[in-house]
Amino acid sequence: MTDRAWWQWRGYAIGLCCLMAIPLLRPDLPPLIDLMGHIGRYGVELGRDHSPFLQRYYGFEWSLIGNLGIDLLVVPLGRLLGVELAVKLIVLMIPPLTAGGLLWIAREVHGRVPASAAFALPLAYGYPFQFGFANFALSMACAFLAFAGWLRLGRTGQLRLRALVFVPVGLLIWVCHSFGWAVLCLLAAAAELVRARDGAGNDAPHRGIVATIWRGGIACLPLTPPILLMLAWRSGAVAGSTGGFFLWPWKLAWMMAALRDEYRTFDTASVTLIIILLLLGVARVGLRFDRMLGLAGLFLLTAYLLLPRILLGSAYADMRLAPYALAMAVIALRPTGQARWWRPTLAVAGLLFLLVRLGGHVTHYAKLDRAFDAQLAAVSHLAIGARVMVLVNLPCQGGWSYSRMDHLGAIAIGRRQAFVNGQWAMPGAQPLTIRNPGVGRFGGDPTQLLRPRRCRKRGEPIFEDTIRNFPRAAFDHLWLIDMPRSGWVRYPDLVPIWHGRTRGILYRVVPSGSATKASDTPKGSDPRATS
């Protein structure tokens, strides 16, 4: 028997982690925005050695960069299970691992998992995860698990073992994604500063500031070797641009969008509830912050405020940190007060909050999965090695929820060994390069992102310009993803070969000199088109 409350049982914590996987069980492809483009790159990674088409269209050279998490994991798993299933299983594990890390951290610091801890778990499905920053999200899960291990080894006095273990751990997390390593450094620094300030053993408590910083810094030295890798990686031509500091309206917007998924009111109300909990902790009304985790959360919040929008060529650098800063602050809370009903009420409310959030993801992901399948039906009409010009019909970015099909066309890379415009081609950011000079300005991201002209961004296409001027000799097909019938075009050299019932159409590009008359292909109603 044990005097622990039900929310402190180990089986309950394991059950919560298992629940975190449920939204991703049904979809064939995790419906995360950028992930589709990454799956295209993984298809090149695994299939290029055996495909003359992929060798012709893409280059792929491994190098030591801080952005290789799933790229490395998919090599053994992809050969065993296939690229798409391997990616699904890896991504499916990220929310449970993130939740496990948060709960373990809470237990190490508080001694038992606080009744309020479940409120932090939905943030594992925060907007950075929804955006499809897959390597980043995996590195954050690993960083939380590593921080919990750091705390445990420190609590048990195994400091020498910790120093030995965390040299390779820090390097591995950096290879997964440099952001996760940086967050681990901030968390460990907060823990060691508090430990050094309080003193240990026979040393005098409450050391001075200089001694505290010195001892805390010495303790964190095992995490510093990736600094050398970072300097070697982000130097010269691959340094990447940095800009967009102190955009305060955006900072507030990203914080309120930390749980952004489908419904603005529901998602912002959920964030507001979390903020109310944190304010209760600040006011010490029924909740109180642990010093160590409170400082860790403050470090993450400060980093969020100081980070620019674009860091070393990576966009949304600050946005990525918002939900994780909130999660760390939530697990820093522990209930106080003598009322017997308060802790069970918090625990039940946290569990219900988690279940409602996960239920929302389940229904939304099922809807997105059906929409993806409807558009991906076009892929079976592509020949092996096809060259495909993709335009994805998207709304302006002011909307809260939309189709998430920004990079859906990249699925044809792995399934049909195709060339598809829209892959990222940033030096040093990933090992893939585009080797198809015939495509000209219609090759890389964001040439596939078709928004209304009034809100298109720099580099994004104009519909009329692309339809008229994309090089016919460099492409076999034009694929208008999620395009309504009103946007289907009639051109003599574009012959419809597939269309959805109401949205999406695939054209065959007819070689010069053999084009049909425009009257033969009226807006996708050509009899050769099949639904």
Image: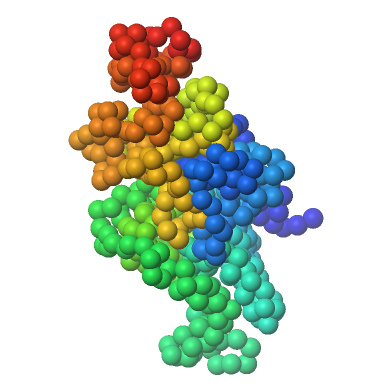
- Specify the quadrant of the image occupied by residue 83: top right
Q: Is residue 298 left or right of residue 159?
A: left
Quadrant of the image for the N terminus? bottom right
How far across and how far down the image is residue 315, in percent?
36, 54
Q: How many numbered tags mark residues here? A: 0
Which residue is depicted at the point 36% across and 30% down?
472
For this rendering, which residue is in front, 393 or 137? 393
Which residue is depicted at the point 75% across and 57% down?
2
How far across and how far down the image is residue 34, in percent?
45, 43
- Considering every residue shown, the one lying at the far right of the view is 1
How far across and how far down the image is residue 238, in percent?
40, 64
Q: Is residue 156 left or right of residue 531?
A: right
For this rendering, which residue is in front, 211 or 27? 27
Q: Is residue 78 left or right of residue 442?
A: right
Which residue is depicted at the point 58% across and 48% down?
45
For this rendering, which residue is in front, 459 or 191? 459
Which residue is depicted at the point 30% across and 28% down?
467
User: Does the rendering let one see residue 35?
Assistant: no
How far across and how far down the image is residue 36, in percent?
50, 40
- Considering every residue shown, the one lying at the far left of the view is 454
Q: Is 364 placed above or below 155 here?
A: above
- Specify the quadrant of the image occupied by residue 25: top right
For this rendering, which residue is in front, 132 or 251? 132
The colour scheme of the drawn protein is: rainbow
